[in-house]
Image (cartoon, grey):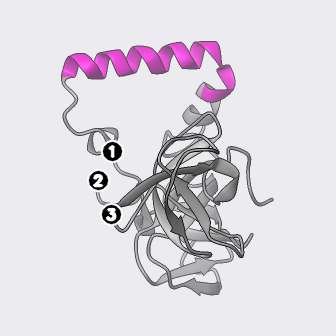
Amino acid sequence: MQGQGEPSIASRSPGLTPRRWALVGLALTALALADPAFAREAEDTPSGFPVPRYLSLKFDKVNARAGPGDDHQVLWVYRVRGLPVQIVAETREWRRICDPEGGLAWVHRRVIDGNRTVMSLGTAPVALRRRPRPEAEITAYVNPRSIAALDKCDKGWCRLSLEGVRGWTPQNEVWGAAAPIQCR
């Protein structure tokens, strides 16, 4: 159901024609055949999306619970809209998330947003560069503990957007882009 957690595939890629959807389907099928673990992960989850995956918090007040249900104790309350989180497990209605501080908790799927964000965790500002190369011109800096929109990652570099500025930074400089599970 759209508007309740992860967006539908159609809402993430506006403007795709039925023919392009068919090509996307063929590409995903080829990927699944080439990597059976990918197909198993996605098919074995209630949402149909692979686990782990990154998303963000939709609201500025989100209850983090000890288990998947309203009857479980509230462990803490997240108060940061757009906070990047990694989905590490899920039920039909609930998502177990790992946050940038290493906390594990359960949240309802309706509080999860399909937009990808990252967070700078270091103590020094992170440079955004015009191109994905260490010698490229610096266009801006991301302050420590700042959240930026993640456009894409490629070959160890991620393109971020923050307050109208875009730039590239090494993938290991931000939390919310690394593939392995961040919390256990």
Image: 63 above or below 158: below
Splitting the image into 4 quarters, where does residue 98 fall?
A: bottom right
Q: Hey, what amino acid is under mark 1? A: Ser
- Relative image position of residue 105 (x, y in whole percent): 66, 71
- Which of 3/160 is in front? 160
Seen from the viewer's position, the closer of residues 134 and 3 is: 134
Tag 1–tag 2 contact (CB < 8 Å): yes
Between residue 61 and residue 138, name the one nearer to us.
138
Q: What element carries label 3?
A: loop
Residue at image location 71% in from the left, 76% down from the top: 123
* Whether residue 136 is situated above or below residue 29 in the rendered picture: below
Residue identified by numbered label 1: 8
Q: Quadrant of the C terminus?
A: bottom right
What is the distance, in whole Å, between disc 1 and disc 3 at their CAs? 27 Å
Write down the residue under mark 2.
Answer: 2
Q: How far apart are marks 2 and 3 (CA)?
A: 27 Å
